[in-house]
Structures are given as structure tokens and as C-alpha cells.
């Protein structure tokens, strides 16, 4: 009985047709492969034909409708937009060059040297007098028929034995105090025109005063003065604050970050137009703080300066010829004035019998606030004013008289100065 099941054996592949049914099984496989190849060839042909047809169609469409050119244009334009992009920049130029302002202004700034006599206590307790030199600055503000007038700080000229003004061309001339106001730390000194060389007069300028009331925080500021006594120097910065109140000092001040050092006192604080907007005062500066300088606003000082510059120029009187008021007193400082609701000045604690003060009606408790129209802030300032007057001369004092309600009433009193006993 024949076996009806045929098994595939691998070895039959090498036996050719001797293996029975193996050749019959190979034929269908070859036939399927040929079909596969035919289908693959047709697919490739179809893809090639379709691709060519699509490209041809796209080309014709592009030629007819112009899409090819637009696409290229869009691509080009997109590139141009990127390559042509620019930042917006300002055309104006900011400069910090103040040389032109300085050139125009520095001929109106002077250096002031104060030779004074100071009392010095020795190691053994004795008192001796010693000559001392201090330096400051000043601003030429006006000229009358016989004098050149210069404004500075009171502390620059106080206690002077001699004052020397040095102009921008290094010419030095002796000067006299015209008037002082210790409360606002202002002074005016006068230089005789006849003592100034002609060439120096041709080179100096009278400063232009600005308006400190219109200052804005942040605007430029330039300080010029005889810093540390080295000669005129320039610093610049901005207005840091206006109407600044400072403990221990009367009035309000301009604050700036332009450096103001010893020797700058009495010099000019300028605006961007080269106008004087303030009178520098290194006295107010705190050495522990940097970037804070102060100046007296020129608009606030104008009235005081006008009064001082129109006073009679006086020379110091020899000490044995000086007049006295005939009082004892002590200082009413700004701190004491606030604490006790008192005016700043000299509190009269005692009146000498038979003195000019007694004859004028001065009594204990009154406070002297002005001498010949100049404000005083203590005994030193009062003695400074008296050093220009001889015994027998008559002066006018402004005094504050205490009332029962704790307030004070102002009165002007004329006093004939007494002679030292």
C-alpha cells in the first residue's frame, strides 16, 4: 500500500528529479516570484511616470499662473527683511565736556588767603599767639567806582589780620572786608581798583548770577575753587537735592555730588550755562561722607550780598583803640534756639554799669541778633564786628526783647561804644 503522505526532506534538493515530488513543489514558488517582480516593475514605472507627470503639470501651472516667480520673490523678500533689520538709535550726542564753561567762568573766581592770629595753649598751660594761614575762594560779583567786590564765606575771612586775593593770572592784591553775615556764612571783600594791575583788570570777569530757585534735581553742576590751596580746580556732578536743611546751620542749601573740599569754600557752583547758582561751603561737609557737597543758594543770598556790598569798607582798628558794648553774654546757637524757642544771637547775661549798653537801655535777657544790619550768631561774630569800630563811635544793634507770653519783640538800639578800662 502506497503512502499517501509526502514529506519534504532537505536532502532531496540535491537529488534533482530523483527525489519524487520535490521538483513539482519548486515550480509554484518560482512563478510567485516572477509575479512579484512584475508587480514591482509596474509600480516603479507608474511612480516614474506619475512623478514626471506631476513635475510637468507643476511647471506648466507655474508658467501659466506665475507661482514659481512669486515663491522665489517671497523667499527673497523674507531674506531681505532679516538682513535689513536695524536697531533704532538716537542721533543726539551726549557730552560731559565743560571746558568751554570753565574757560568763560574761571576768570571770575579768585583765591583768598587769610593770615590771622590764633591763641595757642602750650604744654605747660601758657597762652601764646601764633600766626596762622588759611585759604578759601571767592567770586567777583561787582565793581563800584573805587573797588572790585568779591563774595565769599564768612568763615574764610573771619579773624583775619590780612587778606590777600589772588586772581586767575596769579597776581595777588591785599583786600579789606566790606561786610559779613555770620548767620548765613556770607562775606563781601573789597579790592581797591588802584592796586590791581591793568593787565589783570583786562583778564578778569564779573560773574553772571543765575536763578537757584529754578534748579531741578539731576541737572549738571560744576564747582570751581581753590581746593586744598593748590590753586583753582574744577569738579563736576549733578544737583542731588534742593532746599536741603542741615542741623546746626541756618537756612537751606543746595546739595551736589560735585566734590567740594577745604579751600573750595566761597567758590562758585555753576549750572550748565556757566551761571553762579550757589556759593560753595566746605564747612558744612562731613568728612565721613563722600559725594555730598553743599552750597548756599544764590537766590537766597542775593539780598544779603546786596546789603553787604553797599556798606562802608572799614579797616581793623588797633586793639587798644577798639570800642566795646559793655556786656557779658553767651551764644544762642541754632540748637539752643530750637530747644528754648529763642532767636539766634548773643544772650545778654550781664550789663556793665556806666557802659554804653546800660545808657542805651540794654538789660539781662535781651538777645542781640544784628550789628549794623549784619546777622550775628554768637560772641565771636559780635567781637569780629566790633574789631572795625573805635571807642566813641555809635553803632546800631538789633535786639530781641522777651515778652511775658514767651515771645520776643524786635527793636533797634543805638549805642555809643565805650573804651576798654
Image (tube, grey):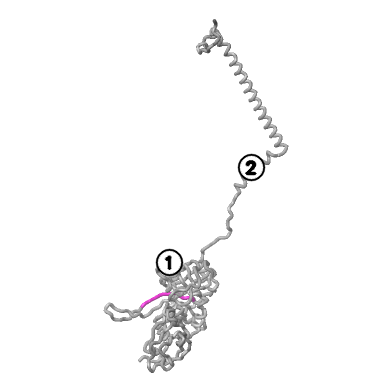
Is the magenta region chiefly helix, strand or loop? Answer: strand
Which label was assigned to residue 183? none
Does the magenta run of residues contain 410? no
Q: Which residue is mark 2?
A: 75
* Percent x, y of residue 129: 33, 81
Q: Nearer the viewer, residue 163 or 62?
A: 62
The answer to whether one can see residue 67 in this image is yes
Residue in the image at 45% along x and 66% along y? 291
- Exactly how many numbered labels are in the figure? 2
Q: Which mark is residue 290?
A: 1
User: x and y percent of residue 146 in the render?
Assistant: 50, 83
Quadrant where the N terminus sits is top right
Q: Earlier in the sequence, mark 1 or mark 2?
A: 2
Which quadrant of the view contains residue 402? bottom left
* Kind of element beneath mark 1: loop
Left or right: 268 with respect to 46?
left
Q: Nearer the viewer, residue 113 or 35?
A: 35
Amino acid at each position: 500500500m502506497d503512502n499517501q503522505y509526502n514529506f519534504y526532506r532537505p536532502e532531496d534538493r540535491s537529488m534533482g528529479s530523483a527525489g519524487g515530488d520535490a521538483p513539482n513543489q519548486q515550480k509554484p514558488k518560482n512563478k510567485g516570484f516572477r509575479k512579484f517582480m512584475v508587480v514591482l516593475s509596474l509600480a516603479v514605472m507608474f511612480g516614474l511616470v506619475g512623478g514626471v507627470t506631476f513635475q510637468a503639470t507643476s511647471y506648466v501651472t507655474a508658467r501659466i499662473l506665475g507661482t514659481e516667480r512669486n515663491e522665489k520673490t517671497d523667499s527673497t523678500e523674507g531674506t531681505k527683511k532679516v538682513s535689513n533689520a536695524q536697531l533704532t538709535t538716537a542721533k543726539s550726542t551726549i557730552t560731559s565736556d565743560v571746558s568751554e564753561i570753565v574757560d568763560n567762568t574761571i576768570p571770575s573766581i579768585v583765591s583768598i588767603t587769610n593770615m590771622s592770629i590764633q591763641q595757642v595753649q602750650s604744654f605747660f598751660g601758657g597762652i601764646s599767639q601764633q600766626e596762622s594761614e588759611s585759604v578759601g575762594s571767592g567770586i567777583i560779583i561787582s565793581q563800584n567806582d573805587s573797588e572790585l567786590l568779591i563774595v565769599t564765606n564768612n568763615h574764610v575771612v573771619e579773624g583775619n589780620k590780612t587778606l590777600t586775593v589772588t586772581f586767575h593770572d596769579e597776581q595777588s592784591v591785599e583786600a579789606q572786608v566790606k561786610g559779613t553775615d555770620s548767620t548765613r556764612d556770607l562775606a563781601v571783600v573789597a579790592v581797591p581798583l588802584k592796586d590791581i594791575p591793568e593787565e589783570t583788570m583786562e583778564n578778569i570777569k564779573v560773574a553772571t548770577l543765575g536763578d537757584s530757585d529754578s534748579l531741578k534735581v539731576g541737572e549738571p553742576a560744576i564747582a570751581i575753587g581753590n581746593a586744598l590751596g593748590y590753586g583753582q580746580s574744577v569738579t563736576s556732578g549733578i544737583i542731588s537735592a534742593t532746599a536741603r536743611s542741615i542741623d546746626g546751620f541756618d537756612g537751606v542749601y543746595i546739595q551736589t555730588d560735585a566734590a567740594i573740599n577745604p579751600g573750595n569754600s566761597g567758590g562758585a557752583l555753576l549750572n550748565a550755562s556757566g551761571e553762579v547758582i550757589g556759593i560753595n561751603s566746605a564747612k558744612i561737609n562731613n568728612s565721613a561722607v563722600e559725594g555730598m557737597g553743599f552750597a548756599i543758594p544764590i537766590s537766597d543770598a542775593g539780598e544779603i550780598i546786596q546789603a553787604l556790598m553797599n556798606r562802608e569798607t572799614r579797616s581793623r582798628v588797633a586793639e587798644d583803640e577798639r570800642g566795646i558794648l559793655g556786656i557779658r553774654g553767651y551764644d544762642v546757637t541754632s540748637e539752643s534756639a530750637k530747644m528754648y524757642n529763642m532767636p539766634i544771637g548773643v544772650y545778654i547775661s550781664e550789663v556793665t554799669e556806666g557802659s554804653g549798653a546800660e545808657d542805651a537801655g540794654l538789660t539781662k535777657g535781651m538777645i542781640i541778633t544784628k550789628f549794623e544790619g549784619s546777622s550775628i550768631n554768637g560772641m565771636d561774630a559780635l567781637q569780629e564786628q566790633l574789631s572795625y569800630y573805635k571807642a566813641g563811635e555809635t553803632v546800631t544793634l538789633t535786639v530781641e526783647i522777651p515778652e511775658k507770653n514767651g515771645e520776643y519783640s524786635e527793636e533797634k538800639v543805638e549805642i555809643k561804644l565805650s573804651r576798654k578800662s
